[in-house]
Amino acid sequence: MAEKRTPIIEVRNLTAGYQDNIVLDDISFDVFAGEVFVILGGSGCGKSTLLKHMIGLYEPMAGEITIDGINIVSANSKQKRQLLQKFGVTYQSGALFGSMTVRENLRLVLQEFTTLPLNIIDTVCDMKLKLVGLEGCGELMPAELSGGMVKRVAIARAMTLDPDIIFLDEPSAGLDPITSAQLDESIIDLSRSLNITFVIVTHELASIFAVADRVIMLDKNTKKIIAHGSPAELKQSNDNAFVQQFFHRKPSLEQ
């Protein structure tokens, strides 16, 4: 069972927010190596806030977050640089530099964190593009890519340093159902073949059921985790009214 494995990410008693506004109140959970872990919930529940704290963009009001044994809040500069090489991040828009080719976008990470010669860097970049089904696309500009291709380039860039963990923020946002399904397949393939741990923020039900091993559901009102487990467990067995509303796509709790 997953509970017997050693967590690669540990979130303990995390309280997070902005100034005096608490968004998440004393939440705890683990993420295990090699699983696809999804953070979900309604609008304004703190999904993106949680993700930003997990990657160290913001400091929590209370609690701690540990990635592979390193506390991201108390880590020194050397440890933080080590952490940056343990995980990759993709954002909702893809966040590619429009004035650079696809390959040049991937080069940036390797040029920052390694001393590899350019020919080796380009070989690595092309290997990562091949992993996401974009072999031969290195010379294209971001403007020449479809929305799904942009998302896959962003994942390839997140993989350039062979991270253990990849954080994805709304990867299916703005994609048509077919492209979204193709992206889901890429995530599953990468997780299974390379044992990459994925932490995904999303509210797309089809993607949740397609890729997630486990999910946690955040609640805007209580500022807590109100459900955790597999998507099927939450849909079939959880008795929380909002969880049932979410998973059965009910427009109101009264229905």
Image (tube, rainbow, N blue to C red):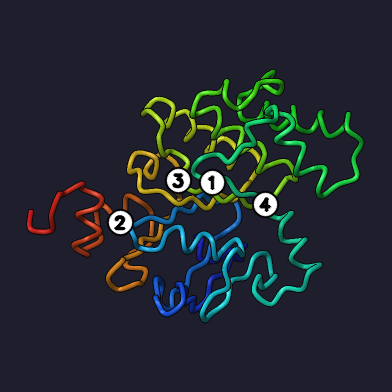
Q: Nearer the viewer, residue 170 or 214?
A: 170
- 35 sits to left or right of 180: right
Q: Earlier in the sequence, mark 2 or mark 1?
A: 2
Under mark 4, the amino acid is: Asp
- 9 sits to left or right of 148: right
Label 3 and label 2: CA atoms lie apart by 13 Å
Q: How many marks?
A: 4
- Residue 101 image offset from top left, x and y in percent: 70, 27
Q: Which type of secondary structure does the marked residue at label 2 adopt? A: loop
Label 2 or label 1, whichever lies nearer to me, is 1
Q: Give above or below for 116 relative to 217.
A: above
Q: Earlier in the sequence, mark 4 or mark 3?
A: 4
Residue under label 2, please give it.
42
Q: Which type of secondary structure does the marked residue at label 4 adopt? A: loop
For the point 87% across and 32% down, the residue is 120
For the point 53% across and 71% down, the residue is 11
For the point 20% across and 48% down, the residue is 248
Residue under label 4, please give it.
164
For the point 40% across and 35% down, the residue is 174
Label 1 and label 4: CA atoms lie apart by 18 Å
- Residue 149 image offset from top left, x and y in percent: 55, 27
Residue under label 1, please give it.
91
Residue under label 3, please give it.
170
Under mark 1, the amino acid is: Tyr
* Label pair 2/4, CB-CB below 8 angstroms: no
Q: Residues within 10 Å of mark 3 (few under 14, many from 20)?
A: many
Q: Which type of secondary structure does the marked residue at label 3 adopt? A: loop
Label 4 and label 3: CA atoms lie apart by 20 Å
- Residue 31 image offset from top left, x and y in percent: 54, 61
